[in-house]
Image (cartoon, rainbow, N blue to C red):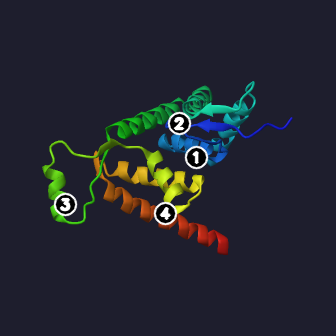
Amino acid sequence: MVRSQLQVVKADGSIEEYVHTKVIGTISIALSEVGQDSVYMAEQLADVVTYYLYHQENAHSVTSSEIFSIIAAILTETGYEDAADALSEYHFKRKFKRLRTEVISIDIQSITDAQVLADIEQPYGVSRWDKSRIVNSLIRKYDFDYPASRMIASMVEDRIFNMEITTVPTSLIKQIVLSEAAMVMRAQRQMQTA
């Protein structure tokens, strides 16, 4: 019996196809956090996750949080409790960063603009960080496909979060999006000519 492609419901409500290699990457990161850099083990554990998900009764979709819970449970049950803990901590920190990061609608082009931002007591045009806005903008304005848009948005989010800033001007986000998009386009061209 051939099973249909499993759909993943993301935290922001968007839906994408289940990607086995993302599970490998997640497990690999968790293992490396505790000094267990084993791609082979990550692949083996990811195979278990994928098998489990596809063999659930009437499984057509799954939430990203359910996948996370299954990965943590499999790590724990196979003796990698430290990796499961590291994964949970990473997940918690990511959620916390998403909650505390605000985007302010201001285009900083000069020191004068920065002074305006510094002087605003109640910033106008403030919204919570939402990676899906980048995805939607890349698809709508620049005709990127969904997987490339998600990848670029994730890269942008990583860079923003690594800066440890909590108020991010839209002009900074735009510059980082353009930089990451250029890198992705360059990589796509290299793959086409190889």
- Left or right for 157, reference 170: right
At label 4, the amino acid type is: Ala
Q: Dividing the image into 4 quarters, which one contains the C terminus?
A: bottom right
CA–CA distance between discs 3 and 2? 35 Å
User: Is 96 situated left or right of 74 in this image?
Assistant: left
Q: Residue at x 41, y 43 (%)?
A: 130
Say whether disc 3 or disc 2 marks the residue closer to the N-terminus.
2
| Residues packed near mark 1 inside 10 Å, few (<14), some (14 to 19) or many (20 plus) | some
* For marks 3 and 4 on the same chain, the one whose residue lies earlier in the sequence: 3
Q: Earlier in the sequence, mark 4 or mark 1?
A: 1
| Label 3 secondary element | helix
At numbered mark 2, what does the secondary structure look like: helix, strand or loop? loop
Front in this rendered view, residue 52 or 110:
110
Q: Is residue 181 above or below residue 122?
A: below
Separation of disc 1 and disc 3 at Cα? 40 Å
- For the residues labelled 1 and 2, the Cα–Cα distance comes to 22 Å
The reply to whether the C-beta atoms of the residues labelled 3 and 2 are less than 8 Å apart is no
The mark closer to the camera, 2 or 4, is: 2
Tell me how many marks there are: 4
Identify the residue under disc 4: 181
Front position among marks 4 and 1 = 4
Quarter-wise, where is residue 174 in the image? bottom left
Q: Badge 3 is on which residue?
A: 113
**Residue where numbered disc 2 is placed:** 13
Residue corresponding to mark 1 = 25
Residue type at numbered disc 2 = Gly
